[in-house]
Image: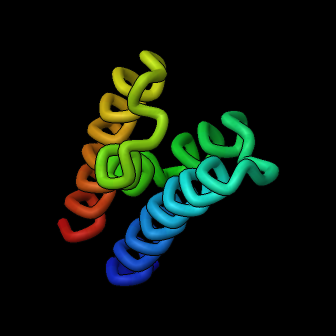
Amino acid sequence: MNNWVLVMIYILINFYGYTVMYSDKKKAKRNEWRISERQIWLTAILGGALGLTIGMFRFRHKTKHMSFRVFLPVLATVTAAGYMYILISLIK
């Protein structure tokens, strides 16, 4: 697989995660039907944890939930490290 494809996948999934937090915050303000926490965690596990974490703090959304405040940044770090490991392995 081309290295740039992997980088683009990582960027796109994290952009999606960022927009999920934005969208859920917007829906919360309008009292509309919300994005489930299950879908948010699924996005995080699939690689979007960094975008979700940035969105969480940028939009001050889900910051009162201990699970999001603690585990989302940890998952973002682990995911980023995993992508870096794969990229470095592919470059060699």
- Residue 47, given in percent of the width and then of the height, sits at 48, 51
The quarter holding residue 3 reads bottom left
Q: Residue at x 48, y 21 (%)?
A: 65
**Front position in the image: 28 or 13:** 28
Q: Position of residue 60 (x, y in %)?
A: 37, 44
Q: How is the image coloured?
A: rainbow
Residue 52 location in percent, x, y? Answer: 44, 50
Q: Indicate the quadrant containing the C terminus: top left, top right, bottom left or bottom right.
A: bottom left
Q: Residue 55 occupies which quadrant of the picture?
A: bottom left
- Name the one closer to the observer, 49 or 81: 49
Which residue is painted at 50% across and 61% down in the image? 22
Q: Looking at the image, which is closer to me, 75 or 92? A: 75
- In the displayed structure image, the side of residue 21 where residue 8 appears, left or right: left
- The residue shown at (60%, 37%) is 41
Q: Residue furthest right?
A: 33
Q: Is residue 55 above or below residue 14?
A: above
Residue name at image x 43 percent, y 16 percent = 66
Vertical comparison of 42 with 90: above or below: above
Total numbered badges shown on the rendered structure = 0
* x and y, in percent, of residue 79 in the image: 37, 44
Give the residue at the far front of this rendering: 30
Residue 73, above or below 71? below
